[in-house]
Amino acid sequence: MTKLTLIKNARIVHENNTFLGDVLIENEIIKQISSEIKTPENTEVIHAEGKYLIPGFIDDQVHFREPGLTHKATIATESRAAVAGGITTFIEMPNTVPQATTQELLENKFEIAAKDSYANYSFMFGGTNDNLEELLKTDPKKVAGIKLFLGSSTGNMLVDNETVLEKIFSSTKMIISVHCEDEATIKKNTALFKEKYGEDIPIKYHPIIRSEEACYLSSSKAIELAKKTGARLHVFHLSTAKETHLFRNDIPLEEKQITAEVCVHHLWFNDKDYDEKGTHIKWNPAVKTEADRLGLWEALLDDRIDVLATDHAPHTLQEKTNTYLTAPSGGPLVQHAIIALLEKVKEGVISIEKLVEKMSHNPAKLFQIEKRGFIKEGYFADLVLIDTHKPQTVTKENILYKCGWSPFEGTTFSSTITHTFINGNLIYNNGVFNDDIKGKRITFNR
């Protein structure tokens, strides 16, 4: 049976353009986009006057903690929060328990998501020093990519054998996404601060321990290796202005072999915020200086940085309130990422068209995701309606993360996400979820 939904009079944001129009959805697909569509019979109509309609955020880096760390989060809880935050597709990382470092363990995660995920999904296969044979079995049409930790790993996922690293870079044409921080530099810096402060190192030294030098040394090495081997490299969560100069903006994204990502927290916070937020803003790589924050914005706007992400990585409040050395790194962000970034639109830092390019169009291009990331006829209807005149304050009561806290607690944002469509289905409507329909495994045009 054909299901029709008509979104009327929306401010449609698409490919560097905003225009008033209607969108007709037939089942899962965008059927028609026009300035005025006559309403067909038996059509559900959503009146969107004054609201922006954007393609859903494709978040290329999240940690949803399942399997094995479900006291922190689950695919169900975090994808639900993501959908409320306008994220319609996520790519999740392999450092769960067990780690997704065999094809069987990777498929286990896909099975959980098929049953539980509110949003569309894919997962990355995790590389180690000794699983190249398994890594090469990864299907490029069905799996987002390969993730390598070149620093800050969990379990045995630190790939520190340079021969193995070169072999991985030389052996696969899939996107290799990397976490770049030099472990030797961090260990040396940690030892110096332990000598001075013992186990009670103040959190404000986090960006000095996990320093600009540690980041730049690792990312520049990875880029050098990618150039040498011809690998397709994507550098996750840049945190320093210095690193942005390693990337180019003189060719289209589709032609780039080496790309970069920046995360919401590195664009929002700076090292002065440790005084108030403490370990709640402890991330790896660290939130650094205001000059770094501004440098990241500059590189995002001039296209040296290609995509935006959250690196959503929840921990319990009890875990996060530990001392500097024992508090884990990471924080929950998927529910509030878009509305935080819309504050920067309001401030004139970035246009809404550029924001949509970085969080929807470019992830779809970069990962070659089939028929998502755009408001185009024939594409999946992964759509988000935003009311930019409906403020909301982040409180304990309205946080959807399983961990129950947010680094944005107490912040009042100017905008509210009112509707989220996943594959043409209205999954989130003004605080009410449709729990009966789940997202789909995304595929790749490779």
Image (spheres, rainbow, N blue to C red):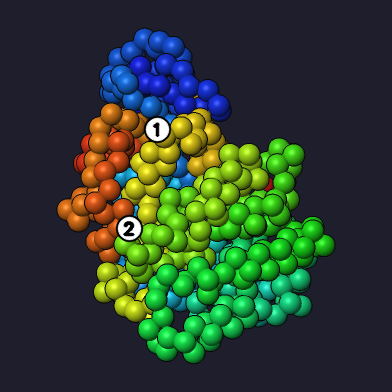
Residue 361 lies left or right of residue 65; in this view the side is right
Residue 42 lies left or right of residue 227; in this view the side is left
Does residue 265 appear in this view?
Answer: yes
Of all residues shown, which one is farthest toward the left?
397
Pointer 2 local density, CA inside 10 Å: few below 14, some 14–19, many at least 20:
some
Instruction: From the viewer's side, name the closer residue of 234 and 127.
Output: 234
> Label 1 sits on what residue type?
Lys
**Secondary-structure class at tag 1:** helix
**Is residue 313 placed above or below 82 in the rendered structure?**
below
Residue 195 lies left or right of residue 118; in this view the side is right
Q: Identify the image quadrant of residue 228.
A: bottom right
Contact check, label 2 and label 1, Cβ < 8 Å? no
Residue 70 at x, y percent in the picture: 32, 70
Instruction: From the viewer's side, name the closer residue of 367 and 206.
Output: 206
Q: Mark 1 points at which residue?
A: 346
> Label 2 sits on what residue type?
Pro
Q: Which of marks 2 and 1 is nearer the N terminus?
A: 1
Residue 255 at x, y percent in the picture: 74, 42
Of all residues shown, which one is farthest toward the front?
196
CA gap, disc 2 and disc 1: 21 Å
Instruction: From the viewer's side, name the closer residue of 298 and 152.
Output: 298
Point 39% across, 76% down: residue:
202
Q: Mark 2 points at which residue?
A: 407
